[in-house]
Image: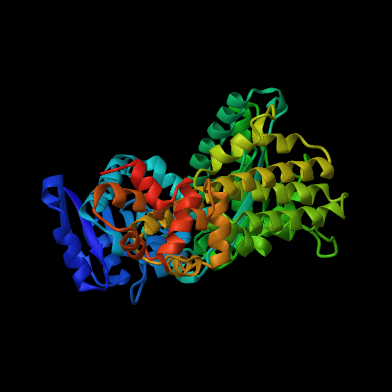
Amino acid sequence: MIKLIIADDEPLVQAGIKSMINWEEHGISIVGTASNGAAAYELILEHSPEIAITDIKMPVMSGLELVKKCREEGRKLPLFIILTSYEEFNFVKEAITYQVVDYLIKLELTPEILLETVQKAIERIPEQQAATQPPDNIYLIREQFYTRLIFNLFESEEQFTAQAQNLNIDFSYGSFAVSYVEIKSEKLTQMSNSKQLNLYTSSLQMVSELISRYIPCHVLSLDMRHFCIIFFLKDEMEKDYKNLIRNTLRQVSVMLFNYYSANIHASIGSPVNSPLQMSSSYQDARQTFARVNEETPILFLEDIAEDEPLKNVFNISLFKEDILKAYAEYDEKALYDTFTSIIELFDNQKAHYVQALDAASNILYLSLSLLGNGEQLVSDIFREKSNGYRSLYELTNTEQILEWMKLLRDGLCRSFTMHNKDYKNHIVINVKKYINEHIEEKLTLNKVAREFNISPNYLSVLFSKNNDIGFSDYINQSKIDAAKKMMTDGDYKIYEISDRLGYESAFYFSRVFKKVTGLSPRGYMNQNPQ
């Protein structure tokens, strides 16, 4: 049996949904109901339901907050169906970003609509279960978690703690240090994409296995040439951590060369006492890497003399709020403005090639890891490049890197625009549905806009751009279609039809009717007798 929970702060709504469908007939068991998001979350932890029907606004924790919490914790299930009212429609866009199955307007809810949506969710369950169960998916969730950690992208300590507990990651160590690593091979540029991928994945596997024999660690992939190593240092390791890490990395480099004719260059940031400070150690490592070379392939921040200034490395965390907002909300304007600001920083300082490359690498990695379909999306943007998005590492000057960033920016903006167009089409579809279901009322732009909690001007523009005719013309056409049906199906007088359809007078109704059909109401009735 498929397990389902219902969350709504109105007991009548809960009862209505429970009785609306014969759930057992469709292989569904309702395992619990909740009156707020916090209680619903407890039900999710207890029963692991495949489907959750939740009101978007509830006390303690809203339905939107519940969906967000589950998705940020890496939960693919339950699949969420959102209940909303017209006045809550402004929340729907955010709900869509968390890949809810659908949203249903309470006043329009029927057994047929509910069952159709539930069946849609049921069809998606196997896909989500396949994505949830295998170790590969847990690996990806962990990678996203560590990505947020080293780039300082967690919104709060509570969010970090909840995700760490859910992923069962132990941070009870004395300190932590982060290393930035590059794979070096003379053959790399001569290899095909598939061979580069094989070298990279094989190298990462070897690095992880070898280092973990000596030091607890996590190896995090960055791109096809770079990765970072997060060292978990026990109390007894802290005193001599530099020699321990250096000797371990040297052994790893020798083994890589023996097996794959490749070695590594690595920089290591200063140890930190809290996992939430890892981003500082990571930034240290990125800056220190500018001093790494063939003579000094492994370098610690502390090895650099205090009077030797380090080159500035691009700090992505300065833009993190804007980037997270743009990616979470598919906000093409925020994305365009943020990327353009970064590009302009280097456009005025073209000599800063290393920093520009660092900025592009950071943005690339965040795009790959934070967007739901990041790998496919970015690959499509660079599909005409011989080496795809990895062509970034073939660029030799700042101007080329900025052009690469512009290509990524414009491609993501196009993708976001298409995503939002689908959302806007959804609004127009529901507005048209509302008009047809309230055709006997007096419908105005202001009234319908209020129902959907959007401005009249926005609704008018949205309707014109996503429909063959404008808002007023659509209402007139729909009312006249209803009038024609009443003329052919019933024994109504013209003034009665006018009154039922909300017109101010029979005279005005007749004028609109003739404008739309080319005939007067009487003329139409004569041509189409019952």
- The reply to whether residue 173 is visible in this rendering is yes
Is 9 left, or right, of 512 in this rendering?
Answer: left
- The reply to whether residue 219 is visible in this rendering is no
Within the image, what quadrant is residue 55 found in? bottom left
Q: Is residue 105 above or below residue 134?
A: below
- Is the C terminus in the top left, top right, bottom left or bottom right quadrant? top left
Q: Is residue 406 above or below residue 152?
A: above
Is 65 left, or right, of 454 in this rendering?
Answer: left
**Residue sitting nearer the eye, 408 or 89:** 89
Q: Is residue 126 above or below residue 314?
A: above
Q: Position of residue 347 (x, y in %)?
A: 84, 52
| Residue displayed at 78% across by 45% down | 402
| Residue displayed at 75% across by 34% down | 394
**Residue sitting nearer the eye, 390 or 512:** 512
Q: Position of residue 417 (x, y in %)?
A: 59, 48
Q: Is residue 495 above or below residue 137?
A: below
Is 334 left, or right, of 340 in this rendering?
Answer: left
How are the colours assigned in the image? Answer: rainbow
Q: Position of residue 340 (x, y in %)?
A: 74, 54
